[in-house]
Image (spheres, grey):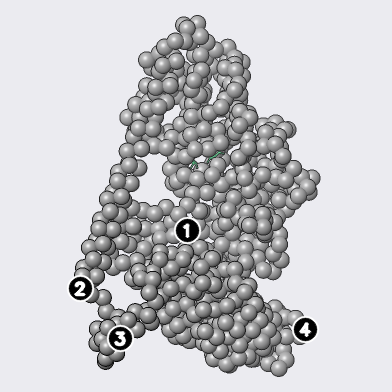
Amino acid sequence: PDLAADGAALLALRAAVGRSVLTWNASRSPCTWQGVECGSGRVTALRLPGVGLIGPIPVAAVRNLSALRTLSLRYNALSGVLPFDLPGLPELRNLYLQHNRFSGNIPPALGSVRNLIRFNLAGNQLSGEIPQELNNLTRLRTLYLENNRLSGSIPPLDLPNLSQFNVSFNPLKATIPSRFRTFPSSAFLSTGLCGRPLQPCLSDIPPSAALGAAGRDNGGGAGKGKNKLSGGAIAGIAIGSAAFILILLILLILLCRRSGKNRTSSLEAVETRVKQPEEAVSASEQDNQVGGSSQANIRPAPTAAIGGGKKLVFFSGARATFDLEDLLRASAEVLGKGTFGTTYKAVLEMGITVAVKRLKDVTLTEEDFREKVEVIGAIDHPNLVPLRAYYYSKDEKLLVYDYMPLGSLSALLHVKEINCLLILVVLFGNGPESFWKEYDVKDMESTGYSVSGRTPLSWETRTGIALAAAYGIEYIQSTGSSTSHGNIKSSNVLLTKSFEAHVSDHGLALLAGPSSSSTRIVGYRAPEVTDARMISQKADVYSFGVLLMELLSGKAPAQALNDEGIDLPRWVQSIVPEEWATEVFDPELLRYQTLEEDMVQFLQLAVDCTAQHPDKRPSMTEVVARMKVIQTSRLKSLSREQHNSNNSIEVSSD
Ligand SMILES: Nc1ncnc2c1ncn2[C@@H]1O[C@H](COP(=O)(O)OP(=O)(O)OP(=O)(O)O)[C@@H](O)[C@H]1O
């Protein structure tokens, strides 16, 4: 076999599954074709994730690619049986076939691909048993088989290097073999398996022993009634299960009701703290609180809203449409606890919704506090969350912001929210297995459920968010040569209903007490920032680079810190750019094949932003400029394509 034979095999593959999507030029070397990589004059890798391949793969096409080390055809619509009925891929290390429509058995012949290290067949329709022959794959480190229809038991494979394993959502049965007991329970979700790490098996007596016992009871007869439970046992199990489900239901209802209750009572604590100490404050002190001279020096005199003796100080652009009493009467809900305190959503009686941040650990004097808040309030830009008002007393410091209805980018990208209704459907519908199997994720999402809990974000939305956040940060930095945000992360990028991004929490580092610095920006903090209070513009650039990586990969930086302590930037840098498309980008982005070049450029920018040395990082202005160049060149090529297609329509209509 040689390169020409590899080329012929690839063309056979294209003819079978990719005729309309692969534009390989047969007159050029296969090594120049999309997704093909060569080494020593042979095809060594074929990576075509999410390109729209469809149909069954001819066995011969794969078998002839005998120098292949990586085959990645994930996220396509490939069907039929797995094309590996004969040994023929001795070099294969990585086999990624997840999220296709392959059916039939896992071919035992795969056991002869002895160099296999990564093997992923998740999200197909494979049935039958997991073949015992996989035991020959002694180098195997990853075996992902979740979301198939595999039955039987897990064979007692002895794979010394296996560190990633999952068989969830398969109708497998019986006890988990001892080799697999060290994997977490998430590796065996929604199966019929039992034993560690799952619940103990109903009976400690293995089925064979039970059979033997039944046989003995029957005097070794024909085996009638063998392995059957008595009527009493069945009734016991039925009553037990019903009671369990009932308890679960009651717990669920209590949980849902409790979370509803929290929503309306959260600002009560604030009210108590605001009212009590205020009563003790002297009249002169109170006068000082209503737009004192220190405020007037910094910006035009703020409007003071006075209600029941309590004052909210509004910034000049904002009308004092409500007062503190209104705020305290509002129904409130905790949005989250952050470094600087707790944030509430407050819906005022007149219909206005605001976000109220209740600051903790403020050690500044009143004068310093007011002065600094006035500076923060004066920073006004369309991509920053507007600070509308504040409240200061000895015991309570509140900041009132515009409420951003879509919440944070972090929640959109990562939060897996399980809707109470969804749990009920799973529990009382047709049962978990049929639920996951029979409902297509897309169908679920179109009915308003989010199965994974993630809102799919398009490429345009992601780049729009990135650019808007960059504008916001650039503006903050433009207000002073050493001014920086100091806490750039995805939970501080908030979104309006139309996905417009606003950076929040700007300037709060100025108000923060020393205790707030320790936990801040884990995963986003630049290496030179040893004390989080020592913020800088180049450290913001680093954090923004991590945020970009998060947007492109869908991975949360704090969670990306794996056992070896590798954070998101180092993980991205450990992967060569040629592999970014398959290894780094969020699978949700794989459908934008034509945009791969743009994605690579954005990721390269993120890599530059996260350079170890601050001087090597671009400035925020350069970051904005580079992002605009990528977007503009994309728009230009789009309009060129449009122009060409219009011309060709005209020509063909001639
Ligand atoms: N103006 C707002 N509109 C809507 N949601 C908000 C607003 N401000 C904050 N939130 C939400 O409240 C949550 C808590 O915010 P908060 O700023 O208190 O903490 P954080 O951003 O998680 O951490 P840190 O304090 O370190 O920035 C955020 O995740 C965000 O979803």
Query: Gap between marks 1 and 3, in whole Å?
Result: 56 Å
Examine the rendered structure and indicate whether residue 434 appears above or below residue 629. below
Please tell me the numbered disc located at residue 40: 4
User: Residue 306 vs residue 597: left or right?
Assistant: left
Which residue type carries mark 3?
A: Gly
Please tell me the numbered disc located at residue 231: 2
Query: Gap between marks 4 and 3, in whole Å?
Result: 63 Å
Q: Nearer the viewer, mark 1 or mark 4?
A: 4
Give the quarter of the image for residue 444. Answer: bottom left
Residue 563 locus on image (x, y percent): 63, 57
User: Residue 319 vs residue 40: left or right?
Assistant: left
Asked if the residues shown at circle 1 and circle 4 are in contact, with their CB atoms under 8 angstroms apart, the answer is no
Q: Which residue is mark 1?
A: 456
Query: Gap between marks 1 and 4, in whole Å?
Result: 41 Å
Which residue type carries mark 1?
A: Pro
Which residue type carries mark 2?
A: Gly
Query: Gap between marks 2 and 4, in whole Å?
Result: 69 Å
Q: Of label 2 and label 4, which has the lower sequence position?
A: 4
Residue under the point 59% across and 50% down: 558
Residue under the point 62% across and 63% down: 584
Density class for disc 1 (Cα within 10 Å; few <14, some 14-19, many ≥20) is some
